[in-house]
Amino acid sequence: MIPSGFDYHAPRSVGDAIQLLGTLGSDAKLLAGGHSLLPMMKLRFAQPAHLIDLNRIDALRGIREDGAAVVIGAMTVENELIRSPLLRQKVPLLPEAASQIADPQVRNRGTIGGDIAHGDPANDHPALAIALDAVFVLEGPKGRREVKAEGFFHGTYVTDMAEDEILVEIRVPAFAPKTGYAYAKLKRKTGDWATAAAAVVLRMDGGNVSHARIALTNLAPTALRAADAEAALIGKPIGDASISDAAAKAMAICDPVEDLRGDRDYKIAMAGQMVRRAIAKAAARCQ
Ligand SMILES: Cc1cc2nc3c(=O)[nH]c(=O)nc-3n(C[C@H](O)[C@H](O)[C@H](O)COP(=O)(O)OP(=O)(O)OC[C@H]3O[C@@H](n4cnc5c(N)ncnc54)[C@H](O)[C@@H]3O)c2cc1C
């Protein structure tokens, strides 16, 4: 319950925050919504000597359209994703899935950027971002660079981001008309992390699947793109055979840890079920 002592910094710009990161080095941690970092500090799993609070940097908030992309500031909280008319219209998977994350109080503080930067395989945004083919914009002392969500997650709590970089925004391609989508999440109770979850984005053309992105949550050390499962759907009509094939291919890449949510066999079986449900729901929404 009691974190160890730290110095607190509240920069007003991304540049100032990057400068502080450079000066303070690995003793410093960025503070976003604080709903992963503070719990870890209270258990003394993390003991940073400095917290750099991003909450007063207005440039990191907000959801806007930029050509064919929707751009989400890293400090945008989950409840803002749920309420956003722009996301509901252009990327409806995000508001629908955000309502399955944590609970209303956590969603008033927890940010999309923090959920991604944390690199926890149990978090939902990593797989959602992979299924959406999102791009993360990172800013460091040498300027900005962009990394695809798919290559960003290297291991549990390990991402492509350097210690002196900040995730500033998430760029998501807007859905083409008639894009189907679903996030199927099995959890023990509201506010729990997934036992297994699957994000699916689909498009159909002339009765056959023309586009499929499938990603899995909490079934390996990182969120996973299930590319073989996608390939099992492309060019075919949606039916029992193709859905079963895709589910089997998704199950084949799972490597979950055994914990209080279940053993490996159960989690892998549930991965298959979540993939099945998400594909069926996404397909029904392609009309
Ligand atoms: C009861 C409870 C239930 C939850 N259930 C779920 C769930 O079902 N699904 C789910 O996905 N999450 C869940 N969470 C996690 C929650 O959504 C967190 O808010 C989220 O994991 C981290 O976001 P944050 O903004 O709170 O980040 P923080 O806790 O402030 O930071 C997390 C980490 O990311 C780093 N960081 C934050 N922002 C940036 C940035 N812009 N650039 C670089 N690094 C950054 C921090 O330095 C820190 O290391 C739950 C949390 C609680 C307390």
Image (spheres, rainbow, N blue to C red):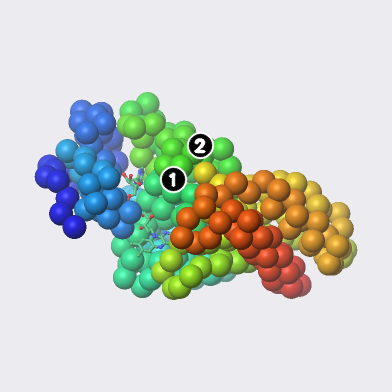
Q: Secondary structure at mark 2?
A: strand
Q: Is residue 281 left or right of residue 97?
A: right
**Where does residue 170 sit, x and y in percent of width and height?**
47, 49
**Where does residue 224 sit, x and y in percent of width and height?**
60, 47
- Can see residue 29? yes
Q: Secondary structure at mark 1?
A: loop
Badge 2 is on which residue?
Answer: 154
Above/below status of 240 relative to 128: below
Classify residue 273 by image quadrant.
bottom right
**Position of the N terminus by quadrant:** bottom left
Is the residue indicated by label 1 positioned so its CB lies within 8 Å of ligand 1? Answer: yes
Mark 2 and mark 1 residues within 8 Å of each other at the beta carbon: yes
Residue depicted at 60% across the width and 66% down the height:
184
Q: Which mark is residue 135?
A: none
Above/below status of 213 relative to 189: above
Question: What amino acid is at disc 1?
Answer: Gly
Residue depicted at 26% across the width and 43% down the height:
46
Classify residue 201 by image quadrant.
bottom right
**Position of the C terminus by quadrant:** bottom right
Q: Which mark is residue 119?
A: 1
Mark earlier in primary sequence (2, 1): 1
Q: Nearer the viewer, residue 221 or 239?
A: 221
- Label 2 and label 1: CA atoms lie apart by 8 Å
**Where does residue 251 sit, x and y in percent of width and height?**
69, 53
Question: What amino acid is at disc 2?
Answer: His
Q: Is residue 124 left or right of residue 211?
A: left
Where ligand 1 lies, by quadrant?
A: bottom left
- Can see residue 68? no
